[in-house]
Image: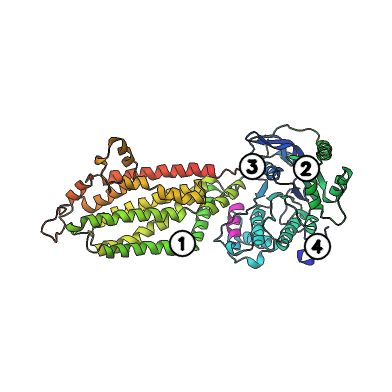
């Protein structure tokens, strides 16, 4: 056992019984867009061993981890198996912890683990057993002292350990980690690798890509697999690496870090010596196998591995609960967003005081509601545009078989509904009262529905922007996505006054249907004449207002139906974009 300080004491305590698993791969050739990433590599990673996967940038380390995890099998030939059973896409027998360890920042450590336990353990598991499981894992990884800390307040090392902790819940036999020490200082790196070593001593197979570790850190690993330009130069124990390289003519200076020495060998210009060593290692690895399939297959015979531990409806409930908890801890959603709507009703009511029933101020009243639907659009769109953090977490969790993408999609679809219902309810009563709008329940309800529909459309466009575009493009897309709908809404120019080839733009403007629907609710349905405070008021008859904006007095329900159809179209686009976004492209 490697010599480490007392602070990093190792233990081989297992969490639960599991089947020790050996990972095998033979003659693996991996190609992406006609570029060879892995070239005829073979190897065997045994259980109970902590393996360092090393190589210079572009050597194929992350690609090999992807292959072992069953990520992006397209372009792969060769044989990859766990316990002699071929690996399938996103294989549920292994877990893959990515380099950036995405987590929901608004949850606590225990809250993150509670959510993960609910998702990854069978629904029939008693709550006491779940709590014991959480405590056991947190203690094993040294996270028990920060159990009530929000994820966003954890150190980098603690976040890395938490990303490992959530995957330990299903007690995996194979763990694959991409650069787990990236961004950590030497102490945090030693903490993390020591915990990984303890897990390996408990019988797991743990493979980590790692870049030039310190000497004392490198000694914690049992085996090392060296890659250079997609080919294996050495595979074996850490102790045997330096003698093997020395036999090929590469001499390691005394007291020199073996990990640094290995990288120097991989990047050296002694091509003939490296080629000879690669050929020798390839032959030695070939002799490990007694034949086997020459290409991967998803057919695993009668072996059935349950991909999800909980049913669809329970996945939906847990995800919906997580979203609700995150929302309550998000200052933007609860304070700024709700406060904005409450303030909008008051401010617009004061500015447009008593204009609702004054025939001489009709244009001001119309402008008031048009501005409101534009603000509702922007506030709802920006509320969900920062979707990248949650999207990254979702990618990891779906790839590691926590839940189905459909369960997440529907939970995300409905998670914002309570706020969507509350916001117009906060805004409209004060606006109606101060601006002297007609106090009729039917008219109020129709305007409320139109504002709600506009908010949902804004949310849809915000989600599309958040899913499809990076941070630099999101705000640009969001701001410009409303230019055409506003321009052809009928407020600035009527559709009948447009040149023929521009009229189709009016037909797809969601602002137009909202705007017309609100004016129909305000001035349609046989409303009485408005008060006139001047000698003559052209808009004294409500019908004249609708005529001015070329609005069908009886078309409210048609406009509402079109908005519902548009929402359905947007939701379909979101789902398709969501499916594409969730593909882990490396």
User: Residue at point 66% right, 68% down?
Assistant: 145
* Mark 1, residue position: 332
Q: Are marks 2 and 4 in contact (CB under 8 Å)?
A: no
User: Residue at point 70% right, 56% down?
Assistant: 181
How much space separates mark 2 and mark 4, taking CA atoms?
27 Å
* Mark 3, residue position: 71
Report whether 546 appears left or right of 195.
Answer: left
Mark 2 or mark 4: whose residue is earlier in sequence: 4
Report whether 513 appears left or right of 223.
Answer: left
Mark 3 or mark 1: whose residue is earlier in sequence: 3
Q: Residues within 10 Å of mark 4 (few under 14, many from 20)?
A: some
Q: Which residues are magenta?
A: 112-121
Is residue 287 in view? no
How much space separates mark 4 and mark 3, taking CA atoms?
35 Å
* Mark 4, residue position: 4
Label at residue 492: none
């Amino acid at each position: 056992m490697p010599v480490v300080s007392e602070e990093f004491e190792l233990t081989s305590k297992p969490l639960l019984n599991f089947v020790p698993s050996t990972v095998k791969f033979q003659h693996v050739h991996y190609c992406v867009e006609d570029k060879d990433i892995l070239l005829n590599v073979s190897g065997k990673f045994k259980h109970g061993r902590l393996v360092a996967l090393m190589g210079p940038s572009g050597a194929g380390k992350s690609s090999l981890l992807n292959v072992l995890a069953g990520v992006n099998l397209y372009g792969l030939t060769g044989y990859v198996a766990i316990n002699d059973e071929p690996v399938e896409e996103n294989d549920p027998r292994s877990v893959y912890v990515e380099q950036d360890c995405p987590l929901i920042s608004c949850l606590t450590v225990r809250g993150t683990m509670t959510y993960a336990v609910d998702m990854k353990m069978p629904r029939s598991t008693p709550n006491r057993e779940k709590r014991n499981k959480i405590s056991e894992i947190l203690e094993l990884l040294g996270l028990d002292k920060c159990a009530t800390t929000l994820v966003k307040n954890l150190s980098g090392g603690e976040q890395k350990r938490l990303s490992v902790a959530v995957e330990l819940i299903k007690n995996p036999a194979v763990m694959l980690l991409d650069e787990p020490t990236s961004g950590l200082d030497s102490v945090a790196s030693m903490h993390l690798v020591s915990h990984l070593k303890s897990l390996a001593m408990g019988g797991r197979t743990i493979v980590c890509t790692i870049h030039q570790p310190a000497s004392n850190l490198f000694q914690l690993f049992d085996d090392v697999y060296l890659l250079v330009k997609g080919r294996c130069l050495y595979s074996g124990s850490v102790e045997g690496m330096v003698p093997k390289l020395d036999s090929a003519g590469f001499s390691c200076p005394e007291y020199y870090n073996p990990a640094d020495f290995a990288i120097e060998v991989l990047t050296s210009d002694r091509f003939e010596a490296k080629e000879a060593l690669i050929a020798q290692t390839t032959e030695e690895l070939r002799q490990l196998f007694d034949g086997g399939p020459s290409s991967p297959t998803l057919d695993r015979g009668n072996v059935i591995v349950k991909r999800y531990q909980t049913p669809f409806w329970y996945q939906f409930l847990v995800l919906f609960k997580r979203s609700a908890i995150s929302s309550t801890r998000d200052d933007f959603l609860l304070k700024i967003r709700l406060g904005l709507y409450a303030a909008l009703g008051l401010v617009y009511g004061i500015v447009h005081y008593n204009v609702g029933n004054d025939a001489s101020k009709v244009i001001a009243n119309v402008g008031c509601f048009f501005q409101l639907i534009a603000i509702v659009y922007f506030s709802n769109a920006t509320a969900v545009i920062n979707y990248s953090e949650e999207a990254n977490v979702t990618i990891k969790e779906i790839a590691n078989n926590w839940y189905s993408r459909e369960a997440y999609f529907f939970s995300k679809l409905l998670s914002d509904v309570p706020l969507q219902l509350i916001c117009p309810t906060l805004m409209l009563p004060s606006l109606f009262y101060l601006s002297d709008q007609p106090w009729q329940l039917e008219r109020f309800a129709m305007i409320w529905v139109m504002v709600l529909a506009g908010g949902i459309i804004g949310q849809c466009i915000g989600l599309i922007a958040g899913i499809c575009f990076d941070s630099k493009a999101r705000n640009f897309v969001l701001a410009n996505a409303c230019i055409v709908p506003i321009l052809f809404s009928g407020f600035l120019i009527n559709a009948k006054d447009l040149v023929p080839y521009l009229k189709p733009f009016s037909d797809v403007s969601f602002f137009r249907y909202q705007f017309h629907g609100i004016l129909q609710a305000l001035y349609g349905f046989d409303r009485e004449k408005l008060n006139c405070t001047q000698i003559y008021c052209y808009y004294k008859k409500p019908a004249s207002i609708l005529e001015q904006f070329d609005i069908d007095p009886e078309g409210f329900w048609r406009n509402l139906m079109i908005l519902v159809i548009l929402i359905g179209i947007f939701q379909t686009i979101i789902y398709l974009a969501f499916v594409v976004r969730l593909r882990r492209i490396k």
